[in-house]
Image (cartoon, rainbow, N blue to C red):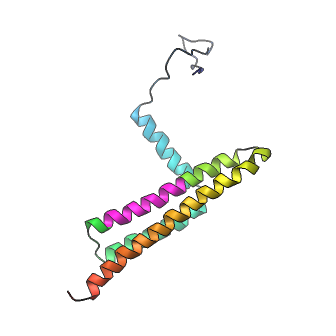
Amino acid sequence: MNRILPLSIENPLGEVHPDQPEPRRSWNTKFQDAIRGIKLGIRGHSSFAVHFFFAALVVAAAIVLGCDFIDWCILVGCIGAVFTAELFNSALETLFHGLTDHNKQKGFAPLDIAAGSVLVASIFAAIIGSIVFLHRLAMLLLPN
């Protein structure tokens, strides 16, 4: 893969060097890039506000109902799955906005698929959350 190396004493003209491997990024840089990606994915996407609201309701309900360790793991996993699907959807939307008008016509199907993945993740998270909370309610209300 050809790549342009940054200007430096060793490469004053920024020449292409196909034989030199790309320098490794540090873990710190990788985490900084990932955090920036999360911020960019959340910023400006109103659907995140809805997901955060429902995630807060789930956490509050889990506290009130006294969910145990396994319940918390299941609920947090569902919240993470929905947030992850939404981040992928946001990434595709960002790419879509960078397309030319001609190419945008081809981009609607992937956008719809990504939105569908968020819907599927949300529906299954709601089903799983309902099962967890109904079980917890039954344990609290019904005598053993």
Q: Residue 63: x, y in percent?
A: 32, 73
Q: Residue 1: x, y in percent?
A: 57, 22
Q: Is 10 part of what is drawn in magenta?
A: no
Dominant secondary-structure state across the stretch colored magenta: helix
Span highlighted in magenta in the image: 72-87
Q: Nearer the viewer, residue 105 or 30?
A: 105
Q: Residue at x 44, y 26 (%)?
A: 24
When the figure is inspected, residue 50 is found, relative to residue 44, above or below; the finding is below
When the figure is inspected, residue 59 is found, relative to residue 25, above or below; the finding is below
Q: Residue at x 59, y 20 (%)?
A: 2
From where the camera sits, is residue 77 visible? Answer: yes
From where the camera sits, is residue 44 visible? Answer: no
When the figure is inspected, residue 28 is found, relative to residue 82, above or below; the finding is above
Q: Residue at x 60, y 63 (%)?
A: 46
When the figure is inspected, residue 15 is found, relative to residue 55, above or below; the finding is above
Q: How many marks?
A: 0
Q: Residue 43: x, y in percent?
A: 57, 55
The C terminus appears in which quarter of the rendering?
bottom left
Q: Nearer the viewer, residue 29 or 70?
A: 70
Q: Is 83 part of what is drawn in magenta?
A: yes
Q: Residue 137: x, y in percent?
A: 32, 82
Quarter-of-image position of residue 79: bottom left
Q: Residue at x 59, y 53 (%)?
A: 90
Q: Is residue 76 left or right of residue 118?
A: left
